[in-house]
Amino acid sequence: MSRVHDMGGRFGDGAVNASDDATFAQDWHARALALTLAAGALGQWNIDISRHARERLSPKDYTRFSYYEKWMGGLAELLVEAGIVTREELQSGKADGISPLADRKLLAEKVVAALAAGGPADRPSDIAPAFKRGDKVRLRARAGNTLVNGGHTRLPAYAAGAVGEVVIYHGTHILPDSSAHGLGEAPEPLYAVAVKATELWEHPENPNDEVILDLWQSYLEPA
């Protein structure tokens, strides 16, 4: 991860409020989620592209926006970039004619099936797994995308260079670093890797804690 969103473990942001578990704290939060899913059903982007759109928000906007405001900011950019709406339409709140994608709208009676189907990311790959459960691995020393400067990656900066242990092999999955930028799915082996808190931070609040990260094979090397 290479942008302002990569805040994991940053000192000084305060504790996570575990009691703040409301699914939708305000009514419009549910509408934001529904609008995002409905727009995704138009088939103009994938989940990695949509994540990267939120990550590309300016640091000023990212830090002042609430969670679902980030979703709406990213979605607005995607809609314009994909040519689905113009900035003028967004600003006016009025469509300029009927969209050529109108026949692809997600109908209410199809929502349950669409959500149940999800978006599976497992794919066959000709890349053989290099690690198995119990293997010690070192995460790549730099967390940036190696394919696109400033691009999307699922390797968090706070864990770069750390040593962990493979606890699950998930099979082969789409590589987000490629998929987020239209470079193809490039599937490769994916693992759950346990990293001790003492490996990640100088003064962990709970030294016996560990973080489980889902990491692609190209993020790892033997340790």
Image (tube, helix red, strand yellow):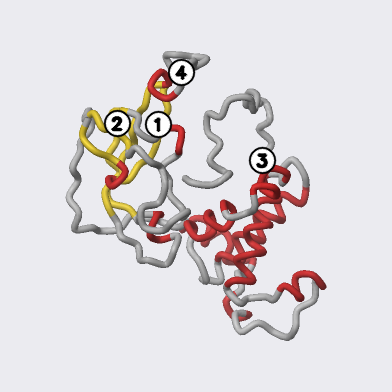
Q: Residues within 10 Å of mark 4 (few under 14, many from 20)?
A: few
Q: Residues within 10 Å of mark 3 (few under 14, many from 20)?
A: few
Q: Residues within 10 Å of mark 2 (few under 14, many from 20)?
A: some
Which mark is nearer the camera, 4 or 3? 4
Calculate the distance from the C-alpha at mark 1 to the C-alpha at mark 4: 18 Å
The disc placed on residue 23 is 3
The disc placed on residue 212 is 1
Which mark is nearer the camera, 3 or 2? 2
Amino acid type, label 3: Thr
Answer yes or no: do the residues labelled 4 and 3 have beta carbons within 8 Å?
no
Element type where label 1 sits in the image: strand
Calculate the distance from the C-alpha at mark 1 to the C-alpha at mark 3: 23 Å
**27 sits left or right of 2 in the view:** right
Answer yes or no: do the residues labelled 1 and 2 have beta carbons within 8 Å?
yes
**96 sits left or right of 194 in the view:** right
Q: Earlier in the sequence, mark 1 or mark 3?
A: 3
Q: Which residue is mark 4?
A: 202
Amino acid type, label 1: Ile
**192 sits left or right of 106 in the view:** left
